[in-house]
């Protein structure tokens, strides 16, 4: 492929550079486990093998809502399904 680059015009090279610069970087996907009362039960990390539970002090969770303890089965007082 490098041999064919010598035949590109400057505009084509600039366009190719712009396309390559726009390639997204890999992302880390975390999923929040939310209780019916809206509190956070925990977080899962999406991996190629499946999902892995993250510990509450994991650096990936910086700035995320804190994991809260289970209170009243996860429901508001007087509220049951």
Image (cartoon, rainbow, N blue to C red):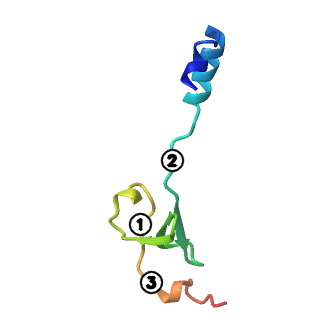
Q: Nearer the viewer, residue 32 or 2?
A: 2
Of the two numbered discs 3 and 2 in the rendering, the one whose residue sits closer to the viewer: 2
- Between the residue at mark 2 and the residue at mark 1, the CA separation in whole angstroms equals 25 Å
- Between the residue at mark 3 and the residue at mark 2, the CA separation in whole angstroms equals 34 Å
Mark 3, residue position: 70
Specify whether 55 is left or right of 45. left
Looking at the rendered image, the quarter that the N terminus falls into is top right
Q: Nearer the viewer, residue 78 or 50?
A: 50
State the residue at coordinates (62%, 22%): 16
Picture quadrant of residue 70: bottom left
Which residue of the protein is positioned furthest toward the front in this rendering?
Answer: 3
Residue 35 point in image, percent of width and height: 55, 77
The answer to whether residue 16 is above or below residue 39 is above
The answer to whether residue 29 is above or below residue 71 is above
Q: Secondary structure at mark 1?
A: loop
Of mark 2 and mark 1, the one earlier in the sequence is 2
Mark 1, residue position: 66
Looking at the image, do the residues carrying marks 3 and 2 touch, with CB atoms under 8 Å apart? no
State the residue at coordinates (61%, 9%): 10
């Amino acid at each position: 492929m490098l041999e064919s680059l010598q035949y590109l015009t400057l505009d084509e090279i600039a366009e190719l550079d712009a396309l390559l610069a726009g390639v997204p970087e890999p992302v880390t996907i975390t999923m929040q486990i939310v209780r019916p009362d809206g509190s956070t039960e925990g977080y899962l990390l999406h991996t190629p093998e499946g999902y892995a539970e993250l510990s509450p002090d994991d650096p990936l969770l910086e700035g995320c809502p804190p994991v809260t303890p289970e209170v009243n089965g996860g429901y508001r007082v007087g509220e049951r399904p």
